[in-house]
Image (cartoon, rainbow, N blue to C red):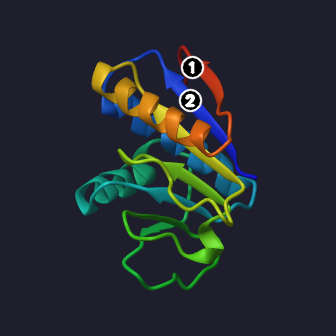
Amino acid sequence: MAEIKFYLLSSTGSDARYRYACKLIEKAYRNGYFAYVLTDSDSQSQWLEQLLWTFRPTSFVPHEIYRGTLPEFANTILISQLPIPLQWQRLVVNLSSNPVGDLGQTEKVVEIFDNDEQVKQIGREHYRHYKKLGLTPITHSIQQFD
């Protein structure tokens, strides 16, 4: 059964949300996860891909935008709106406006929401979706992060 984690940021704006996502993605990579970052669009994927290069000067997270072809190196973080390849279903960082649908192979889903009212509404919809599946998301309130 998948573990669902909600991170609720006190700040507003997508910049803080994506920077926090980078922090969690880096942590996942260091812990050996084949993480998949689910987005809504190619432009959103490209923005996050660029941010992963620059969010922390000392960080290195091998990543690429997934376009249907698996990467050469297995521990690469994939970013895309496409269906999640089997090997990358273990950990899903969901930045899309839809909840993760197929949780068959997924061990953990990470959802990040900022304090914008529209984003919070999406979070509420995701929460209800997971509850209907019999899962209770674990919620973490994040006041500030570096």
Q: Amino acid at mark 2?
A: Tyr
In this rendering, position of residue 44 left or right of residue 93 = left
Q: How far is mark 2 from mark 1, CA to CA?
A: 7 Å
Q: Amino acid at mark 1?
A: Ile
Element on which disc 2 rests: strand
Element on which disc 1 rests: strand
43 vs 117: above or below: below
Disc 2: which residue:
7
**Looking at the image, which is closer to me, 72 or 115?**
115
Q: Is residue 49 in view?
A: yes
**Crowd around label 1: few <14 · some 14–19 · many ≥20 (10 Å):** some
Name the residue at 41% across, 73% down. 66
**Crowd around label 2: few <14 · some 14–19 · many ≥20 (10 Å):** many
Q: Position of residue 9 (x, y in %)?
A: 48, 22
Disc 1: which residue:
142
- Which mark sits nearer the N-terminus, 2 or 1? 2
